[in-house]
Image: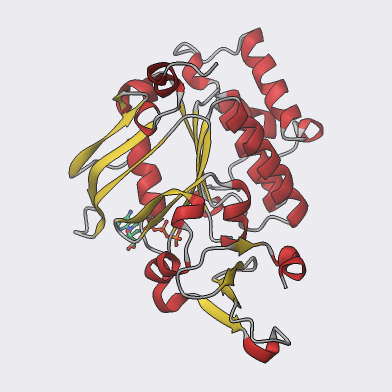
Amino acid sequence: MNAPLSTRLRKAPQPGDGLSVEGIAVTYRNGQTALRNTSFSIPKGSITALVGVNGSGKSTLFKAIMGFVPLAAGRVRIFGGPAADALKRNAVAYVPQSEDVDWNFPVLVEDVVMMGRYGHMNFLRMARPADRKAVDEALARVGMADYRNRQIGELSGGQKKRVFLARALAQEGKIILLDEPFTGVDVRTEEAIIALLQALRDEGRIMLVSTHNLGSVPRFCDRAVLINRTVLAEGPTNEVFTHANLEKAFGGVLRQFILGGADLHDDADPRRVTVLTDDERPFVIYGNGEDSHDSAGPDELDEKK
Ligand SMILES: Nc1ncnc2c1ncn2[C@@H]1O[C@H](COP(=O)(O)OP(=O)(O)OP(=O)(O)O)[C@@H](O)[C@H]1O
């Protein structure tokens, strides 16, 4: 027998229970307004893509959630309370863009991951057995245990990303913000990171991932937020990731290829294949018109013909 409606409604994860960004604005000291009236919310146990052109405010949004930049308006709520409380509890982990990290700083891989434990330590920052265990587990989980005594600057781009992910895991962040985790990463590492994010989602964590790899988004992200200085569209990926919305988000920046008619079919089938890309991994749409959002990875294309 079905549970009463009230019980089912209570159990369904609600966006307000997770991360909620409510009408925020960020203006930098040089007068540049990077975000205005920006609102969206995402529930626990989900992966959300943050998508927008260069300079659309993705990194600024992460910094606003982390409290690194002041809000000129609005507020961020986490698990129904003020973001500052969740930040104090180390509930939010941030994996920055590679360009934002000084890789020449002489520090070992295990020390980088131990930094994730700082918030759990007292002011003397003396690592306890529980901290060392968390570091060991985090390194093992990203497949970097063998590199623990290497200098971080000696690693490849993909290995560095995995170490920073390990730092977020060691922190035991319930919300993990990842700024372009796939840039400069080979396909195998990308797959490994995606598998890890999916496992973390199944543990009930929230991941917000900025990416330019449009083709990957429908494959592993439950939701998407399209931004350009404000939110253009947000919600479940299959509703948000439409041709019309991507056009709105990217304007003339996207490269677009359309295949249809005799190039695609040997009958009068009106359906077309549209490939949108701003990066190496394109987003492929198959359907009748502008509003179709029947997406497929490039390798699925043959089956759809
Ligand atoms: N520290 C800063 N001081 C002044 N302006 C800034 C600062 N950081 C970013 N901006 C400006 O804010 C806007 C948004 O930048 P942001 O880095 O958030 O974009 P982004 O979407 O992350 O871009 P990308 O995809 O290139 O990483 C840009 O116009 C940028 O020039």
Above/below status of 287 relative to 194: below
Q: Is residue 108 visible?
A: no
Determine the quadrant in which ligand 1 lies.
bottom left
Residue 117 location (% of width, % of height):
55, 21
Residue most extreme to the top: 129
- Which residue corresponds to the image point at 78% horizontal and 30% vertical from the top-left? 145
Residue 46 location (% of width, % of height):
52, 36
- Which residue corresponds to the image point at 68% horizontal and 34% vertical from the top-left? 109
Q: Quadrant of the C terminus?
A: bottom right
| Residue sitting nearer the eye, 151 or 253 | 253
Residue 280 location (% of width, % of height):
64, 68
| Left or right relative to 76: residue 145 | right
Above/below status of 33 relative to 169: below
Q: Quadrant of residue 192?
A: top right
Residue 28 location (% of width, % of height):
24, 53
Q: Quadrant of residue 34?
A: bottom left
- Which residue corresponds to the image point at 69% horizontal and 55% vertical from the top-left? 185
| Residue sitting nearer the eye, 252 or 57 | 252
| Left or right relative to 99: residue 186 | right
Above/below status of 279 relative to 69: below
